[in-house]
Image: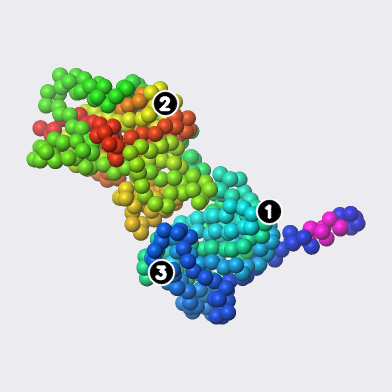
């Protein structure tokens, strides 16, 4: 062998770049190993007692015992250790791996604190039962992974493993903690952001030119002819309502029994049996699944105004249309939002059908209701027999003015047809070029709130 090549190979080997495939540092076979771990919270707002740790023979995947974690509640209870191998060059390994057994679905986070760098923080959704986890450590593209352990960030000082809001009394088990040189793709991994898969999805477009699904890339060519002309825009909610009422009067010429209903939180007179009662049929929430993982929405909350942006930072909406008499003919419907922008938007918005009965006081990047987890962050995963969202675009169009009305006629027909559930929709723009903020259901001015105008003909 050439001496120079041999010298380079030897240096490469001695530097630690050629490493053992599997370096085990958490097998939990004795009480001494248990003392290396402590408990606490990754979120300072938790007031509950930290989890309790003990050894258990139940659910051990290596040796005769594993670590049992019994929770006492809290937002982000965690376990942590400062004892692990290769703290000086942990970045040169490709993954941290461990076996996790849970008695319910959950979100697990892994956090590394380095000496001179912001913490590495990765999160994964897992299902009830045994999950073999791999967490990428190597620096990867920011969008794909968020970040990695920084070779220039100094030694790793602490490893934290935390969980999202486990119930009091929940019991999880961890075993076979190790660092690995290679990353097994067949196991759960944080190596790819689900938004990348979402952009490759195909959708059926209600009212489109084709019945078969189309890709997002080719979406605009599949819309019904003249869809843009069906959209309305105005400078104020009153001006927009005037345009819709003009449509209503025109439709009444051929459908004299047609009626107009305005579905908006705080609106009175919706229920003919209780005309003084305020309508309260909207759900409205916001979630972020933006990289890095630490930026994903942990707690629900929505002010009077919120950004209207892309699918990884998005608002959810649902509106109760049960006030419409069964069997009504839906003649026209408009979904109206008030934004802070006067100029028309250049981005295409789509209403993506949600397949979960979500609760806007519990929605986060991880959950759609209390203790109920999305299949993938933010409901982005569409695979399997029970996806978070359906491959259906209920409505589509551009923001046309400060107050814009999207044609939702096909969506309301879908919700009232008697065959399909109404769980609302995500409402992203596809390219982010029309970034703006819109009034939410919590807006102080009632007329600024999200509104559904429906013109219908009652069943005769």
- Is residue 355 on the magenta stretch? no
Write the residue at 59% across / 50% down.
147
Alpha carbon separation for disc pair 2 and 1:
43 Å
Report the Cα–Cα distance between label 1 and label 3. Answer: 36 Å
Can residue 194 be seen in the rendering of this structure?
no
Callout 3 environment at 10 Å: few (<14), some (14 to 19), or many (20+)?
A: some
- Magenta segment, principal secondary structure? helix
**Residue at x 42%, y 72% (from the top left corner):** 70
**Percent x, y for residue 302?**
35, 44
On residue 151, the disc is: 1
Q: CA–CA distance between discs 2 and 3? A: 50 Å
Q: Secondary structure at mark 2?
A: loop
Q: Count the marks: how many?
A: 3
Q: Earlier in the sequence, mark 2 or mark 3?
A: 3
Residue range (magenta): 6-13
Of the numbered discs in the image, which one, if any, rests on residue 49? 3
Going 11% across and 37% down the picture, which residue do you hit? 275
In the picture provided, is 445 more to the left or to the right than 153?
A: left
Residue 145 at x, y = what percent? 56, 49
* Residue located beneath label 2 in the image: 345
Choose the circle earlier in sequence order: 2 or 1: 1
Q: Is residue 303 visible?
A: yes
């Amino acid at each position: 062998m050439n001496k120079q090549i041999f010298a380079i190979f030897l240096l490469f080997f001695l530097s630690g770049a050629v490493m053992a495939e599997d370096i085990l540092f958490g097998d939990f076979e004795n009480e001494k190993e248990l003392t290396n771990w402590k408990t606490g919270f990754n979120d300072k707002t938790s007031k509950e007692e930290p989890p309790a740790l003990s050894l258990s023979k139940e659910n051990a995947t290596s040796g005769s015992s594993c670590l049992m974690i019994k929770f006492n509640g809290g937002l982000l209870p965690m376990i942590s250790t400062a004892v692990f191998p290769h703290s000086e060059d942990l970045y040169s390994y490709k993954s941290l791996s461990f076996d996790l057994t849970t008695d319910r679905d959950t979100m697990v986070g892994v956090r590394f604190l380095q000496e001179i760098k912001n913490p590495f923080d990765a999160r994964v959704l897992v299902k009830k039962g045994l999950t073999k986890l791999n967490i990428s450590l190597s620096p990867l593209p920011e969008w794909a992974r968020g970040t990695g352990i920084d070779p220039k960030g100094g030694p790793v000082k602490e490893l934290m493993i935390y969980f999202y809001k486990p119930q009091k009394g929940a019991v999880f088990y961890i075993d076979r903690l190790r660092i690995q040189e290679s990353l097994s793709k067949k196991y759960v991994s944080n190596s790819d952001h689900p938004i990348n898969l979402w952009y490759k999805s195909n959708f059926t477009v209600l009212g489109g030119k084709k019945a078969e699904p189309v890709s997002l890339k080719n979406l605009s060519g599949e819309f019904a002819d003249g869809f843009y002309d069906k959209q309305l825009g105005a400078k104020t909610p009153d001006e927009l309502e005037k345009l819709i009422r003009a449509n209503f009067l025109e439709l009444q010429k051929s459908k004299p029994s047609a009626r107009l209903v305005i579905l908006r939180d705080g609106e009175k007179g919706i229920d003919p049996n209780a005309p003084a009662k305020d309508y309260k049929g909207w759900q409205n929430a916001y979630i972020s699944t933006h990289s890095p993982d630490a930026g994903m929405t942990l707690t629900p909350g929505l002010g009077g105004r919120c950004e209207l942006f892309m699918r990884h930072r998005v608002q959810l909406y649902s509106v109760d249309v049960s006030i419409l008499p069964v069997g009504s003919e839906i003649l026209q419907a408009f979904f109206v939002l008030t934004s802070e922008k006067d100029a028309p938007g250049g981005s295409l918005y789509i209403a993506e059908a949600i397949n979960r009965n979500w609760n806007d006081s519990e929605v986060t990047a991880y959950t759609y209701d209390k203790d109920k987890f999305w299949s993938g962050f933010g409901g982005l995963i569409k695979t399997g027999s029970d996806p978070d969202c359906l491959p259906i675009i209920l409505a589509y169009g551009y923001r046309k003015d400060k107050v814009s009305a999207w044609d939702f006629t096909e969506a309301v027909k879908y919700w009232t047809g008697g065959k399909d559930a109404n769980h609302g929709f995500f409402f992203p723009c596809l390219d982010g070029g029309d970034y703006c903020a819109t009034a939410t259901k919590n807006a102080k001015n009632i007329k600024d709130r999200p509104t559904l105008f429906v013109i219908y003909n009652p069943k005769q």
